Image: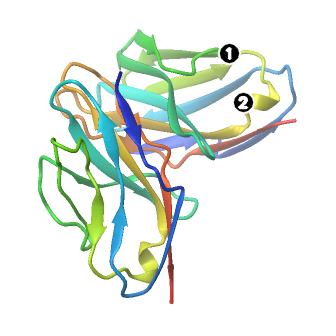
Amino acid sequence: DAGITQSPRHKVTETGTPVTLRCHQTENHRYMYWYRQDPGHGLRLIHYSYGVKDTDKGEVSDGYSVSRSKTEDFLLTLESATSSQTSVYFCASRLAGEMTQYFGPGTRLLVL
Amino acid sequence: AQRVTQPEKLLSVFKGAPVELKCNYSYSGSPELFWYVQYSRQRLQLLLRHISRESIKGFTADLNKGETSFHLKKPFAQEEDSAMYYCALSGHNTDKLIFGTGTRLQVFP
């Protein structure tokens, strides 16, 4: 568990402001993922990365962008936060060739 | 389309009772199935995966390809089993996991 961290752990922001969440892993995992967790929806994939500078969209990518400039960091940016983006955000990572994903502790984001 | 269905949002049992959390999937090939558990306000943790066929914390799950199910079972529930449980599926030609909407298990003393 200690190999995957997220920052910040809690954030309150206002509608229309940009927000960046950071995921950091020390496992040298090739793949990294961003999910949001909402009641009644479970976990939904926002974006994922299959290598440095290689990213792809998930099922709920609108309003979000990501960047991965090095193996250990995967950033999620809400370009202009909206109240519908209030959620708990989880990062995950895994090794290539292994489907088990390992999760970070989550970030609680409140958009007012 | 790939889909994971967990029909129960909430399952409440008393300590010592058997538990079965249902998971049905839709996938045209041979999927890999997982159960993840999330204790209160904690990160998700892998509970078990079907290819390892192991029993973790007394839980087991058998992949039934005929019924496209991967139900999670435990013969005697404990209070510490209270948590959110997610079933997830991965296909062999995909980089992603598809999660169900989760079932909250409450075990009363």
Q: Is residue B53 visible?
A: yes
Q: Residue B95 is drawn in which quadrant?
A: top left
On screen, B56 above or below B66? Answer: below
Q: Mark 1 lies on which chain?
A: A
Q: Position of residue A58 (x, y in %)?
A: 48, 19
Question: How would you rate the neighbour count of disc 1 (Cα within 10 Å): few for under 14, some for 14-19, many for 20 or more?
Answer: few
Please tell me whether mark 1 sits on a helix, a strand or a loop: loop
**Frontmost residue, B2 versus A44:** B2
Q: Where is residue B48 in the image (x, y as percent from the top left)?
A: 24, 55
Instruction: Identify the image's colour scheme: rainbow, by chain, secondary structure or one colour.
Output: rainbow
Please tell me whether mark 2 sits on a helix, a strand or a loop: helix
Which residue is disc 1 drawn over?
A63
Q: Which chain carries label 2?
A: A
> What amino acid does circle 2 point to?
Gln
**Numbered tag placed on residue A85 in the rendering:** 2
Q: Position of residue B29 (x, y in %)?
A: 17, 25
Q: Residue A40 is drawn in which quadrant?
A: top right
Instruction: Report whether A35 appears left or right of A16.
Output: left
Q: Can residue A2 be seen in this view?
A: no
Residue at image coords 51%, 32%:
A44
Residue at image coords 87%, 30%:
A14
Q: Position of residue A112 (x, y in %)?
A: 88, 35
